[in-house]
Each structure stands twice: as C-alpha cells, then as structure tokens.
Amino acid sequence: MHDYVIVGAGSAGCVLANRLSANPSNSVLLLEAGGPDDSPLIHTPAMMAMLPDTRFDWRYRTAPQPHCNMRRFFWPRGRTLGGSSSINYMIYIRGHAGDYDQWRDLGNPGWGWADVLPYFKNAENNERLGEPLHGRGGPLNVADPRFRHPLAEMFVAAGESAGLARNDDFNGATQDGCGFYQVTQKQGLRWSTASAYLRPAMERPNLAVVTNALTCRVRFDGRRAVGVDYVRRGVAASGEARREVILCGGTINSPHLLMLSGVGAADEIRRNGIEIVQELPGVGMNLQDHLGTWLRYEITQPISLYGTTPEQLAAAQAEYESKRQGFFTSNVAEAGAFLRTDENIDKPNLQGFFLPYCLTEAPAEAPQPYCHGISFVFYVNRPASRGRITLASADPLDQPLIDPNYLADPRDLTQFIAGIRMARRILAAKPLGNILGRELGPGLEAQSDEAIAAYVRDHASGTIFHPVGTCRMGADTLAVVDAALKVRGVDGLRVVDASVMPTLIGGNTNAPTIGRACSRDRDSEGKSCLAGATGFWFARMEHRNLTSAQRSAQMTAISSTRTIGASCMLLPPCRTGSSGASGISTLRATTSGLLQSSRPDRRSIGGSIGWWPSESAGARLPGSRTRCTRFCRRRLRKRNKGDRCRTSSDSKR
C-alpha cells in the first residue's frame, strides 16, 4: 500500500515522483511500462534519430488521414524512464505568454503567465540566462548548444538579412525572430527528467520505481480510485493507493487508460464491453498536434551532413568521448525561428527549425535526395484542427485509435501556404542564398496556392511530436479535469501530463510539462495533500509542513545524489576490456547509420522527421506477449462479471 501511485515515468511522472517523495512521510509507487534508460543512444544527443521504433518508443501509428492523401503517420512517444524527454530533440521552449493567459481565460484560474512563470524559474538551471525571466539552481539544466553547424550559422545570418530580428532567447521578453535554441543538456549529455528529477530520488526508501509494468486499468471503490492493476513480465500485480492515483501517461495513454477503466464517453465504453464508472464525454477528444511541413534545397558546397566519411565519424566520436564536445552533442535542429505571416496578429503563428541536410519525402518509395542539401521544417503554432483518441478494443495491449484529423480545418493549410512563401524568402537571403541549388521541395513549379497545398497534403508533412489536449482542463461539460487537475466526478484521481492542455502552446511542449517542478504550497492547516499540479501541471503541490532543518537535509541529500546521478550517465571512455566498452561499441556500430549517406535503407540525422517507418507497424503495444494478452482478456472478462482477478501483492513483485 502506497500513499500515491503514479502511472508513467515520463516528463511529468519523474517530476512528481521526486516532489512527492521529498516528503519522507509520503510513500510513492512509480510505474513505467518501458525499461530503464540505459542505452548510450539516449544520453548522446546526436543519437536521437536512432530511438524511434525501438524498445524506447511506443511505436504508435495514426489512422489514415483523409486530408493528407490517406497517409498514416508514425507518432513516436517515449517508453522508458524519462518518457519522451528521453527521445526528443531537447529543445527548451516555454511558449508564448499569451497562451497561458488564454488558458486562464478559458476557466482555469492559476494558469495565467504571471502564475506559471515562477514555476518555470524554480525548475530551471539556465547556464547563460538569469533574472528576471530565467532561473538558476533548479534540477532541469538548460544550456546553449555546444556545437553549431556552419550551415546553421548561415541560416541565422540569412534570417537577419531577410529582416528577422536576431533572438538569443526565445523564452525571453519577445519570441519573434531567428536564432539558436537552448537545449536540455548537461555537460554534453541529454538531461531528461529521469536524469534531472528521478535519479536523484532513487535512493529514497519511500519511493518504489517499477519498470516494464504495463498498467491495465485504474481500480475504483465506488467512485473513488483506490489503485491500479498492471502486468509485469506476464505476471499480474496491483498497486494500492491510500490517497491518490496520478496518471502521467501522456496525451495518448492517459485517456486510453481512463476509458479502459470505465471513465469516458458512455457509448464508447459500453461498445467495448466495459462497465461505466463515470461518464465524461470529453475523454480522448480535443486532440491537437503540431503537424510540420518542410522545404528542401540542394546546396552547391559539400558542407552538409550528407556523405560523412568513416574518418569524420571516428574523429567526432573521439572528440565526444574525450571532451564531450563536437557534433555528437548536437540536437541537429540547432537553429530556428518564430515567424508571423500576418503583421496584424498578436503573436508568432509559425515555429521553424533549420536542418543541415535534406529530409526524405513520404512515402519511402518516393524519389529521395542523395546530395548535399538543407531543410527548413515549420509548423502552425496553434492549429485549428481537432482529432480524438478512441478505444480499439477492451484489451489493454491493443493500441488505441489515434485520429489527429490533420488539416481538417482549412485555416491550417492557409497558414502553411503563407509559411512556405515566407521561408523561401528567408532561405534565399545571403549568405545562405549564395550556395542554394535546386529547390527539391515543393519545387519551383509549385507557385500557386493549390500546388503548394497539394505538396503539404500529399507528401511533405509529418508530426513534430507535440500531441496535447485529450484530458483537457476546464469548467465546461467536455472538460476532463478541473484547474487542480482532478478528474471530474470521481475522487482520488488526477491526470498530470500534456493531455490536460486546453490548447497547444506556441512552441515545443516538453518544457511546459515540467516547468512547475519545484512548487510546494501549504494549506491553512498544514496537512499533507495534493491540491493541484506539481511540475508545470501540478501547480499547487501541498505537502505536510516540514521544519527548516528537514528541508535543508533534503536539499543536501538531493544535491549529493544528483552528482551521483550525473556521473552514472557519463559514457565511459572506450578501452579494451573496460566495463563500458560494449556501450561505446554499440554507439560506434550505429553512428554510420545516423549520418545521411548514399544508402537509402538507413536513417538520417533527424530521422524522426525524415525517416518513414512502415505504416502497418504498431497495431499492438511493443513487447506484448501472448501470455500477457491472455491475462488481460481474462481479467477484463472477470471484471465485467463483477469478480476481481487474483493478483500478486506489491511485496511479491
């Protein structure tokens, strides 16, 4: 029996586990469906292209998209400690201040920009920037990129030539302009929430972390959540919660688990033979994502990532091993811009990323570029199209049906067309324009609105990995959680992840998911409670009162443990017979596939955007076993008959 059971050790779950277990009187169980974040591919920044469609990814696929030539899109989501913060591009963007004020105005008090800024600052340790908008000393390390590709430097200079303002802080007073992104890295390593928050807390006796544990349902006693049932390596287990169950599974998994547990639209749940606990028609609705499109150009100078030689790779690897410097510290999308296609709008409506190589085109059978080139990827910051998540079946091992409904609202495509025209002008400016060759996509023949729209719909578009909104907060009948992130109509259950966002922010979504990480309030009686969101989502974490001596002792312990956690993440030098040799060998064995070459069957850097896995993959959860399937189906049949399936206790895990 634990006080809190947290489902999902991702960007939000790791923060929650740290904050709740900081109070020694709280007992916390953290369940993660994936395994440990033990691969050097996770912690080496430039290796992120090797992570989608591996054991660290849920391998989701969308339904065919009617407004995108019936294409299915792959949706990588992190399935390991740290969740998507362990496989993403590490870009630290909070979003525009107006986005949060809009949340507040939608009926969510405490979520305006003035309310959330202190939590962002508390979470942050910014190596370059400080007050009044940035923090120092927080767990989440934010740094400037250690490596800047020469083409990225040329892009920023071209943006300035085209009239964009140089912006050295996209999280500062203004978001507009071009510049280099800051990243969540520390000493040349990815700094995920597992590194920043979970690892320092792992030695606490009141925190239990269980990996490879797929949660099948939330258990209720009447309308109160009292625990969860999960499967770990084919064995049934349960986690009991005295106080709260907190879902941190993300925009796909949290609504999926709610529906499997009988919370959601009544028709949807009954159709799958599940007993209704609480009717909430908004569960799974309001799905939003940043759909991206891109321009691709040949360049006349051999300075892109195409055709990197084994000798160059070996030199980059040696530099990284010895100094934690060089290309292997790069997130590849080093530079970018926030743009307005209409001077009359009040905030940037596009965000773009420059890549020093040519992206591939969907589908994989299409002619692909094998040349030195560049790409500019961008998305509409606040798309108007809305999709949904629904059940495929009552089997927890069956992936839910994901329908983002891309481009259903014509206003989104209008902004893409304007964005392509604007990006063409920027990329043609000096000095980048001096080395531009052919425009490979959309191509000079695509000049009309219709031709550009067809290019975006049919070939050049894909997820930029920011799904939100399926358990949105609010006060209306379609809201799933209230402003304190409590699931409406039941007790003892919260959702704390990006699914509670009412609308997409103008920017990457990882930083907002963890921004309020260090907030702790007290209620008037000094009792231990969870009154809101910890991390950015958990706005008002309320613990039992601690004395100043207890707080000081905790901070000392966290600081010393954090050092241990950081040293554990360092890749060992490559020495014959060393304990770390296998990890470095694994890293070396995969680097030749990272950099784009003339081999069409290999992924390129940034492959999550440019590499197109099989559309048919992902019908079942990765790593699922027939034994687990039989167990889950048997359990569901017994549950629907009102009988509880026997499970092992926590002590027998």
Image (cartoon, helix red, strand yellow):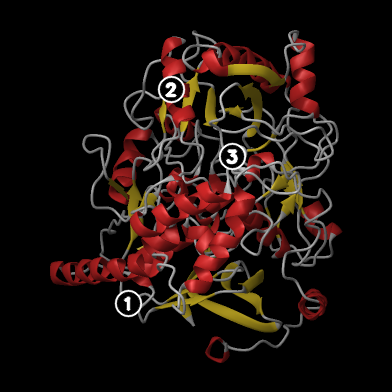
Marks 1 and 3, how far apart at CA: 36 Å
Of residues 139 and 570, the one drawn nearer to the viewer in this rendering: 570
Question: Disc 1 marks which amino acid?
Answer: Ser
Residue 322's quadrant in the figure? Answer: bottom left
Mark 1 closeness class: few <14, some 14–19, many ≥20 residues within 10 Å: few
Q: Secondary structure at mark 1?
A: loop
Q: Which residue is mark 3?
A: 476
Mark 2 closeness class: few <14, some 14–19, many ≥20 residues within 10 Å: many
Q: Secondary structure at mark 2?
A: helix
Question: Which residue appears at 81% of the width and 52% of the height?
Answer: 267
Of residues 502 and 311, the one drawn nearer to the viewer in this rendering: 311
Marks 2 and 3, how far apart at CA: 44 Å
Question: Disc 2 marks which amino acid?
Answer: Val
Vertical comparison of 617 with 261: above or below: above
Measured as percent of width and height from the top left, residue 407 is found at 73, 27
Q: Which residue is mark 1?
A: 25
Q: Which residue is mark 2?
A: 156
